[in-house]
Amino acid sequence: MVEFLATPRDAADARAEVDSFGASRVPLAGALRAFLVADDEDPDPHEARDELAALVRKHVELGQGVLVLTGFPLDDERNKTALVRFTSLLGEPLPQDGEGNLVREVRDRGTAIGEGARARYSDSRFGGSLHTDGAEAPLPAPEFFTLLCVRQSVRGGALEFVHIRDLEAALAASGDATAALREPFHFDRRGDQAPGEPPTTLKPVLFTQHGKPAISYLRGYIERGHEHPGIPPLTERQRTALDELDRIVAAGGLTRAGKLREGELALFDNLSLLHGRTEFQDEPDRTRLLLRTWVRGRSAVCG
Ligand SMILES: [Fe+2]
């Protein structure tokens, strides 16, 4: 059973009222806008890529790890085209499941906590359980993920994130935890493995990718991974380190939050950020919908 650990509701809602996206919001303009909304089938990406590289450097690499572009077209077809083009500027889109989907709809599919061997956070409406995307996949981890907000929930649905800079500083005061988290854990594959492949992938929580500190994490997938027959259970040392990481995150002092508005596209540094959201509730006639891509991307914009 995979448990998506809940963040205490009141604390999460209170944090979500502080909008940390403000400084990361940039209106979509110039060559970048022209490229993303161009009517021609194959617009020239060069100027747009340069503009995006400067924004990524400022907001994602050197800033809080997030860039939010505002003013996207809200028409369904143009949204999807713009997202695919945006992703192509960053690098290579990655399949997000065993079926090979490159653009995934993040919405409440009624997945309940603890349900099924393939239940995913992104298919539920629940909050908490800060994580990285692709935690179920072998390394290298996707460098970025994007979320384009097509429809936002009225209640809940704010994004929360914690930067690895802050996390590592807090963990440094916790004795052996950092060393234990740099050793491998079994992460459950959520059924995405090819026939004959093992149901877990072995990788550390804290590691280095492209020479920078990186994290891959979703507690429930690690718990499930170590429950498979033939896989050793978590050791006391491993469990203590994971508990310490969860304790630091749950304390909330390192967490920033913001709620995407419709027509906004967020780019997240998936190596540097744990992220999650506050629980949301769809209205009967209005359902929250985000479009997501995963990107293998450092070379394209970051040199
Ligand atoms: Fe996620």
Image (spheres, grey):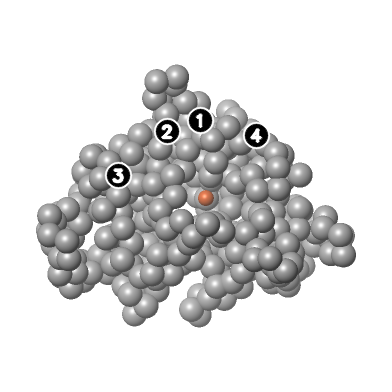
Secondary structure beneath disc 4? loop
Circle count: 4
Picture coordinates of residue 71, whole percent (x, y): 21, 44
Counting residues from the start of the chain, the first of labels 2 and 1 encountered is 1
Q: Which mark is residue 264?
A: 3
* Residue receiving disc 2: 288
Q: Which of 60 and 100 is in front in this view?
A: 100
Counting residues from the start of the chain, the first of labels 2 and 4 encountered is 4
- Distance from disc 4 to disc 1, alpha carbons, whole Å, reads 13 Å
As drawn, which residue projects farthest toward the front?
195
What's the amino acid at mark 3? Glu
Secondary structure beneath disc 3? loop
Picture coordinates of residue 51, whole percent (x, y): 20, 66
Q: Quadrant of the C terminus?
A: bottom left
* Residue receiving disc 4: 112
Residue at 67% of width from left, 59% of height from top? 189
Counting residues from the start of the chain, the first of labels 4 and 1 encountered is 4
Residue 288 visible from this viewpoint? yes
- Distance from disc 3 to disc 4, alpha carbons, whole Å, reads 28 Å
Residues at marks 3 and 4 touching, judged by CB atoms closer than 8 Å = no
Q: Nearer the viewer, residue 118 or 176?
A: 118
Q: Which mark is residue 280?
A: 1
Q: Nearer the viewer, residue 185 or 37?
A: 37
